[in-house]
Amino acid sequence: IMYCVDEVREENGAVQIWRESKKCAHDSKNPTQATKAMTVTTLVGPKHSVFIWDARLLHRSLPNQTSKARRVLIWLISSESKPGVQCYK
């Protein structure tokens, strides 16, 4: 869950998500052809926006090309009952 304290735009470090990446194995250092062909969703919105996604999806933050910080609060929720989720105790 990501709560946007500030407006989030592509130029100030928006998060991009590959929605289909959960369906196939991938190496984040060497994306496969399948990963390259996937649809990329860029999460942009006004301040106080909330975005929720599965953290196991391939995702990244774009570089902040402005002189002002982009502030967000992020909550990671995990469960030992879900395969592929790392739980910290």
Image (cartoon, rainbow, N blue to C red):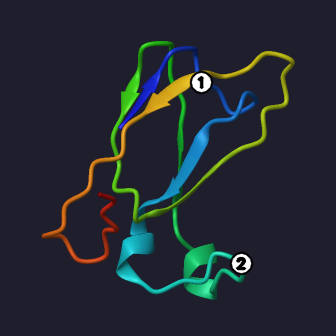
Residue 11 pos. (x, y %): 76, 30
**Does residue 23 appear to the left or right of 13 in the view shown?**
left
**Does residue 52 appear to the left or right of 64 in the view shown?**
left
Q: Residue at x 78, y 33 (%)?
A: 64
Residue 69 pos. (x, y %): 73, 20
**Amino acid tagged 1:** Val
Of the two numbered discs 2 and 1 in the rendering, the one whose residue sits closer to the viewer: 2
Q: Residue at x 41, y 20 (%)?
A: 49
**Amino acid tagged 2:** Lys
Label 2: how many residues lie within 10 Å, few (<14), some (14-19) or many (20+)? few
Residue 35 pos. (x, y %): 57, 77
Q: Which mark is residue 8?
A: 1
Query: Disc 2 marks which residue?
Result: 29
Q: Quadrant of residue 21?
A: bottom left
Earlier-in-chain disc, 2 versus 1: 1
**Does residue 62 appear to the left or right of 84 in the view shown?**
right
